[in-house]
Amino acid sequence: MNTPYTTLISAQQLQALITCGQALMVFDCSFDLAKPEAGEAQFTEAHLPGSVYVHLDRDLSDKSGNGQAASGGRHPLPSREPFAAWLNRVGFASGMQAVVLDRQGANYCGRLWWMLKWCGHEAVAVLDGGLQAWQATGGEVVSGASPAPLAPGAFTLGEPLVPVVDAQALFRRLGQPGQTVLDARGAPRFRGEVEPLDPVAGHIPGALNRPFTENIGADGHF
């Protein structure tokens, strides 16, 4: 495997990997919190050939309520072992380059980027500009459902490359030297002026606001 992409990958770089036969998998995480079925419909209409659709509620969260989730919240993290089993079911292997994208300004694919790091997989990058950038460079798109894996994957959990901090630990650290909390939601939600999703408006005391939308330029790239 060549030097892996671990943060961002351009559409041109992805095309080069595909052309040279690099072992990789593209994950499309398009989603809409207000309309959970919309992302999969967008994928069915047009996606990169061979890419796998990833559903936030179904694949990247554990809403079973069986006590096995790795976190709480509106979208509880699945434990690492069930998530690794899902990766194997879709045909992903530890030696592959993972590329993640969505159509919402990297709002959702960043979760899969982080989760793969959490499972010890370094070679995962966000497609800069998403599907729009791929199409703008003449990249092919197809319609239909995710392809069935040719064979089960060979993904093995590694030591986490990123940490998890639970609410209790964060509460104990608030106001302590070296502790910074960044809130990536829109400013009106941060200020508590509107709250369309969560039961309580506002933000964690002392948090700083950096809306994720400000990470993306007018051209749709980071």
Image (cartoon, rainbow, N blue to C red):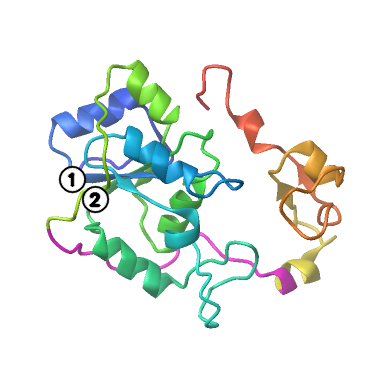
Q: Can you see residue 150? A: yes
Identify the residue position indicated by label 2 in the image: 96
Q: Which mark is residue 133?
A: none
Residue 27 placed where, x, y %?
34, 46
On screen, residue 10 above or below 183: above
- Number of residues whose C-alpha sits closer than 10 Å to that of mark 2, classed few (under 14), some (14–19) or many (20 or more): some
Residue 165 placed where, x, y %?
63, 67
Which quarter of the rendering shows the N terminus?
A: top left
Helix, strand or loop for the magenta stretch, by majority: loop
Q: Which residues are magenta?
A: 151-168
Seen from the viewer's position, the closer of residues 1 and 54 is 54
Seen from the viewer's position, the closer of residues 30 and 172 is 30
Residue 128 falls in image quadrant:
top left
On screen, residue 24 above or below 70: above
From the viewer's perspective, is 130 left or right of 71? Answer: left
Identify the residue position indicated by label 1 in the image: 23
Mark before the other along the chain sequence, 2 or 1: 1
Residue 159 falls in image quadrant:
bottom left
Q: Is residue 105 magenta?
A: no
